[in-house]
Image (cartoon, helix red, strand yellow):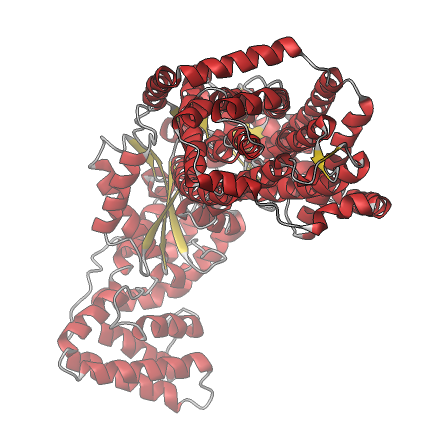
């Protein structure tokens, strides 16, 4: 870089002014910092993950259109009531919806599809013809059992019928092993809290199946009240829901409520990101402070560096308010990034100041000399680092663009603080003998001369490492699942993954809007024929097919299963502990005496004997009452719903379905919603062929798979564009300022090797790029190039011990600057937010690799510089 005596003179005069007017400068800086800190309190937080991408992208526009037409699909809470039986899940859902209805302030709207009376009444008609036939056969077979229980639904009566069935005297119309298995499950835990009730719905084959994980679920969609004046808009609603869950005893146990949905996901993601930022920021300050102490070997100088850092952070936060007005889930990392980066310029100033003191200069002269010598490399470093951050601003990755704008401006804040507050504090702090002693201490460290003494070997190994690293780097993967960047332990994430695994959520669905019923029918037929589509659902799906045949089946079934019998009084009749004990022992004996008793019969016999023994104890009366409840409490609700479903005797029309369900499937503007269920709930890559096929039929399709596929493509383009912009811009700046292409190559080549090594280690460690850490390489390029700049300019300056730039204060500043930056970045790993943690890991790993390669390869490629006397700097 060519000399600029005029600029150097201006810097020296400025520093002289700061030293002379140190107290006014400190007061002004204090006032400005306080004002910036107050302004930073108004910094908002945007938790919408889709807002991280440009609203101009077509798939974002399609998603926003769906949100506008069907608000209940957006900003919602998805409640999953889980229980070991469908009856218990339904009963808990009834209690929950009653509680939701009683709190319209927090929950102004909710929808429980399975609780919709119209759907329950037409439940049999909505089954497939084959499924309805099977359910009808099961109910017909159960008719004798129901007829006998109708007279006296009690425990001894049920046991007595099973005795007759076991002795082959009569049948009960049900598959006995299934009955034995269900009774055993109840009796084995009858004395426990949260024991399962006997599922008559399961025994009667009433059309409800357990999930793959063996639980029954009721899904409730809630539209909560959101307070956007708060950082966490859904906090009040979620706190109310958690309190409600506790009051209903649905926190834990056999019957429980699990919470997810976009509001819960956003709230927990923001909470994990904020928690991680606070934790990482605190640890970063502690680690940076410790490293500054080691690097500067002076409590006073370390304190000056920390004060400069904290002041710069407050100023940068104030500028963020003016620049963007808010931060997002990615730009939250700005605080930790600044802690890692913001102290580096002050560190270089302090080390060079200490070096000048060791050379015999007075304090004011040392301050002026340090700043005058460093303003070029520090200005160039701030510029190149800012370019790395700014490179995302022109891309479609708007969320990272905001981070880039804030962090890029912050680099100039750090530079300004290093030439105002830092020298002013140095002018106030007296020069202590400890500072001079630390500056004059020069350990031998012969290993520092290795890059110069073995230049060819170093360069050969660097070339080999580059080839090996970049051959592996091509295998780096991209994980486009937004769940992958969230806290994996958060309830909303765990619940959503469980629902997706069992196919109980539309999270992986694709959605299409049709302008009319005719177009909805046409699109549904074409979409249903696509490979990879499990089913297509729209309002049309609630108009049953083959209604004449199904109505005939229901008519026949009414002759076999009397609806009036089902709709009667099925209140369980209490029985004494003694009566239950005798009946239990009689059934156990009958089951045990059969020569061909199977394992289920023997299991039930053992459960009956254990139950009889407990009935004889002091708590026998209470256990008898509880056994009656467990065996019969679910009977009446199930039979009454079956009676209502059997009573349906006319076909469903589309107008009727629209009148009842239309609010959930047809928008006020007349748009018809079509939900496409994939056969698999895999990641965006496995769903990409299906997304492409659906787009051929409906170009404006949206939904999470579409967003994931398109977002991955958009972010990939943003990454490549940012990388290109950063590389070209930094190269141009270096060429313009340094004016020596060879020196530019000396700086950039180690960065290329370090970048390749970073990708190679990610591949070997099984790490993938995601929505958060994909920004790492462009940022690293801007950050790590500073080290090469400092080394090249210090090498030019000459006056080096043994001609080795590694033996200068500049190299020491690079090492400890890299350590403080890596410590700042690395503390992001402590964040429970997986995306932030992965960003911190990649940044810390990449920076250390790039700095290590630069410190080894760059001195070897530069060769020895002009030497200094043995006691020189």
* Quadrant, the N terminus: top right
Residue at image point 34% right, 29% down: 231
Q: Position of residue 727 (x, y in %)?
A: 72, 25
Residue 531 in view here: no
Residue at image point 19% right, 81% down: 615
Foreground of the two, 854 or 773: 854
Residue 615 in view here: yes
Relative vertical location of residue 218 with respect to residue 413 in this rendering, above or below: below
**Going by the image, does 183 lie left or right of 714?**
left
Residue at image point 20% right, 49% down: 247
Residue at image point 63% right, 8% down: 6
Relative vertical location of residue 203 with respect to residue 514 in this rendering, above or below: below
Snapshot quadrant of residue 9 = top right
**Going by the image, does 160 lie left or right of 727?**
left
Residue that lies at the very extreme toward the top in this rendered image: 6
Foreground of the two, 591 or 353: 353
**Going by the image, does 432 lie left or right of 526?**
left
* Quadrant, the C terminus: top right
Q: Position of residue 347 (x, y in %)?
A: 53, 33
Q: Position of residue 467 (x, y in %)?
A: 83, 44
Relative vertical location of residue 581 with respect to residue 640 in this rendering, above or below: below
Q: Position of residue 110 (x, y in %)?
A: 32, 35
């Amino acid at each position: 870089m060519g000399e600029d005596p005029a600029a150097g003179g201006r810097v020296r005069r400025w520093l002289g002014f700061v030293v002379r007017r140190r107290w006014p400068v400190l007061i002004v800086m204090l006032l400005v910092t306080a004002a910036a800190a107050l302004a930073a309190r108004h910094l908002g937080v945007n938790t919408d993950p889709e807002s991280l991408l440009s609203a101009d992208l077509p798939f974002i526009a399609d998603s926003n259109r769906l949100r506008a037409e069907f608000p209940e699909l957006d900003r919602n809470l998805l409640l999953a009531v889980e229980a070991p039986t469908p009856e218990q899940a339904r009963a808990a859902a009834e209690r929950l919806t009653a509680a939701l209805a009683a709190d319209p302030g927090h929950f102004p709207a909710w929808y429980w599809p399975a609780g919709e009376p119209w759907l329950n009444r037409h439940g049999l008609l909505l089954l497939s013809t084959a499924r309805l036939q099977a359910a009808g056969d099961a109910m017909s077979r159960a008719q004798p059992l129901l007829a006998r229980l109708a007279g006296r639904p009690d425990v001894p009566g049920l046991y007595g019928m099973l005795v007759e069935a076991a002795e082959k005297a009569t049948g009960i119309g049900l598959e006995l092993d299934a009955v034995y298995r269900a009774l055993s499950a109840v009796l084995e835990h009858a004395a426990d809290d949260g024991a399962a009730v006997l599922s008559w719905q399961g025994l009667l084959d009433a059309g409800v199946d357990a999930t793959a994980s063996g639980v029954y679920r009721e899904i409730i969609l809630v539209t909560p009240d959101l307070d956007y004046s708060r950082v966490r808009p859904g906090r009040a609603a979620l706190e109310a829901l958690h309190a409600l869950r506790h009051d209903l005893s649905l926190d834990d146990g056999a019957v429980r409520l699990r919470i997810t949905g976009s509001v819960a996901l956003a709230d927990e993601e923001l909470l994990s990101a904020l928690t991680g930022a606070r934790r990482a920021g605190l640890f970063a300050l502690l680690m940076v402070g410790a490293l500054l102490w080691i690097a500067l070997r002076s409590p006073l100088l370390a304190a000056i560096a920390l004060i400069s850092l904290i002041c710069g952070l407050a100023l940068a936060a104030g500028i963020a308010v003016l620049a963007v007005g808010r931060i997002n889930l990615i730009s939250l990392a700005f605080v930790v990034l600044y802690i890692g980066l913001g102290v580096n310029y002050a560190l270089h100033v302090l080390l060079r100041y200490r070096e000048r003191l060791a050379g015999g200069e007075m304090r004011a002269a040392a301050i002026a000399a340090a700043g005058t010598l460093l303003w070029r490399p520090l200005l160039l470093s701030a510029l190149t680092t800012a370019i790395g951050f700014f490179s995302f601003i022109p891309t479609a990755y708007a969320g990272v663009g905001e981070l880039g704008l804030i962090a890029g401006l912050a680099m100039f804040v750090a530079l300004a603080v290093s030439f105002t507050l830092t020298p002013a504090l140095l002018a106030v702090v007296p020069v202590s003998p400890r500072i001079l002693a630390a500056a004059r201490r020069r350990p031998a460290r012969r290993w520092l001369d290795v890059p110069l003494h073995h230049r060819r070997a170093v360069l050969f190994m660097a070339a080999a490492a580059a080839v090996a690293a970049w051959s592996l780097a091509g295998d780096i993967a991209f994980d486009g699942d937004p769940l992958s960047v969230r806290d994996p332990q958060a309830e909303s994430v765990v619940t959503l993954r469980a629902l997706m695994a069992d196919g109980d959520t539309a999270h992986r669905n694709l959605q299409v809007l049709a302008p009319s019923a005719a177009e909805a029918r046409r699109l549904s037929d074409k979409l249903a024929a696509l490979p990879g589509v499990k089913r297509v659902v729209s309002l049309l799906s609630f108009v049953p097919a083959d209604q004449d045949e199904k109505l005939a089946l229901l008519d026949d079934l009414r002759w076999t299963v009397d609806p009036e019998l089902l709709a009667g009084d099925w209140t369980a009749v209490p029985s004494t502990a003694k009566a239950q004990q005798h009946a239990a022992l009689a059934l156990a004996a009958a089951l045990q005496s059969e020569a061909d008793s199977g394992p289920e019969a023997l299991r039930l016999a053992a459960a009956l004997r254990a139950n009889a023994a407990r009935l004889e104890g002091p708590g026998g009366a209470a256990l008898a009452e509880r056994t009656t409840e467990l065996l019969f409490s679910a009977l009446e609700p199930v039979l009454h719903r079956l009676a209502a479903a059997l009573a349906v005797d006319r076909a469903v029309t589309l107008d009727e379905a629209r009148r009842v369900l239309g609010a959930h499937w047809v928008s006020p503007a007349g748009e018809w919603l079509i939900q496409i269920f994939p056969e698999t709930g895999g990641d965006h890559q496995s769903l990409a062929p299906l997304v492409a096929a659906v787009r051929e039929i409906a170009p404006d399709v949206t939904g999470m798979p579409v967003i994931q596929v398109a977002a991955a493509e958009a972010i990939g383009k943003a990454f490549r564009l940012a990388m290109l912009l950063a590389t070209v811009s930094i190269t141009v700046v270096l060429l313009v300022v340094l004016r020596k292409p060879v020196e530019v190559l000396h700086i950039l080549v180690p960065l290329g090797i370090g970048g390749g090594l970073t990708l190679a280690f990610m591949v070997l460690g099984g790490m993938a790029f995601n929505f958060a850490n994909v920004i790492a390489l462009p940022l690293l390029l801007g950050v790590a190039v500073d080290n090469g700049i400092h080394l090249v300019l210090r090498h030019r300056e000459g006056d080096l011990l043994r001609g080795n730039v590694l033996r200068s204060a500049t190299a020491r500043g690079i090492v400890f600057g890299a350590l403080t930056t890596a410590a700042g970045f690395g503390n992001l790993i402590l964040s429970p937010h997986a995306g932030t943690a992965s960003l911190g890991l990649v940044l810390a790993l990449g920076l250390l690799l790039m700095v290590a390669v630069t410190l080894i390869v760059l001195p070897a490629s530069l060769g020895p510089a002009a030497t200094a006397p043995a006691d020189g700097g």
